[in-house]
Every structure is written in C-alpha cells, then in structure tokens.
Amino acid sequence: MPLHYSKKVMEHFLHPRNIGEMKDHDGFAEVGNPVCGDQLGFYIKVKDGTIKDVKFLSFGCASNIATASILTEEVKGMTLEDAKKFDWNKIVKDLGGLPKQKVHCSILAVDGLKKAIEDYEGRKK
C-alpha cells in the first residue's frame, strides 16, 4: 500500500531543519512509539521564557522526520507557555496533510517538545 506524501512532507523529510544534537541545551527529552518503533529526541535552549533554539534527532520514517522538522521551525521564538499549548493538528495542516496511519508522528513530535519543556522547568527548580 503506497503512502502519498505532500510536497511539503517530502521537502522536510529530504531536507530536515534543525536536526542534530545540542551540547549546551537547557531541556531534553526522548520519546518513542513502541508500535511503529519511531523515536525522537528534542533539545531546547531557552532565554527569558522563549525558545531560542530547538533541535531534534530522529529514528523513524519520513513522517517522523518531517513532523519534527516543521515543529522546530514553528516553535523557535515561541514562548514556553505558547509552545506548551501547541496542537499537533497544526503540524498536519501545515504539512498539507499526512496519511491517516502516519498522523501519530505529529502527536509524538508535540509530546517530545512538551517533555523537553518539562525537563527544562524541572531543572530550574
């Protein structure tokens, strides 16, 4: 069964933005989906309550990489409070849709970002 990806998904898959490790991160989280095996790691750098930089590492499919890539573009410069409210539906919309069996990748990406924010907040306490 072939999956039909939008041009935007393919662009983010083939040329992901903000991919890589961040040595001096303020928050980090790893998330995974045991059913499909996808994994993501998110790093954030925070200044004055705003995400100044964000990077990710991926072990997964095209949707996994594309959803994490577009998410990092969209939350960079966002306040932590706004990032905590980020809705996975926005990723699906902004990518021009995802096959229904791949929508879970957008949920995983948002979950990873939120856990990285939780890690940052926990370190501040």
Image (spheres, rainbow, N blue to C red):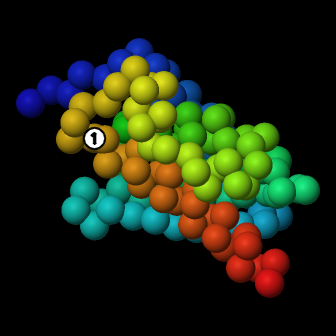
Which residue appears at 42% of the width and 59% of the height?
39
Residue 4 to residue 45: above or below: above
Q: Residues within 10 Å of mark 1 (few under 14, many from 20)?
A: some
Identify residue for label 1: 102
Q: Using the rendered image of the protein, determine whether residue 79 is visible from the camera's viewpoint.
A: yes
Residue 76 to residue 33: above or below: above
Q: Residue furthest left?
A: 1
Residue 92 to residue 86: above or below: above
- Point out residue 23 in the picture as x, y percentages from the top left corner: 78, 63
Q: How many marks?
A: 1
Q: Amino acid at mark 1?
A: Lys
Q: Secondary structure at mark 1?
A: helix
The quadrant of the image that shows the C terminus is bottom right
In the visual, does 50 lie left or right of 40?
Answer: right
The quadrant of the image that shows the N terminus is top left
Q: Using the rendered image of the protein, determine whether residue 58 is visible from the camera's viewpoint.
A: no
Which residue appears at 32% of the width and 48% of the height?
104
- Point out residue 82 in the picture as x, y percentages from the top left corner: 67, 48
Q: Residue furthest bottom?
A: 125
Nearest the eye: 121 or 5: 121
- Point out residue 48 in the picture as x, y percentages from the top left corner: 90, 56
Residue 111 to residue 53: above or below: below
Which residue appears at 15% of the width and 26% of the height?
2
- Point out residue 10 in the picture as x, y percentages from the top left corner: 42, 23
In the visual, does 98 lie left or right of 14?
Answer: left
Q: Residue furthest right?
A: 48
Which residue appears at 66% of the width and 73% of the height?
119
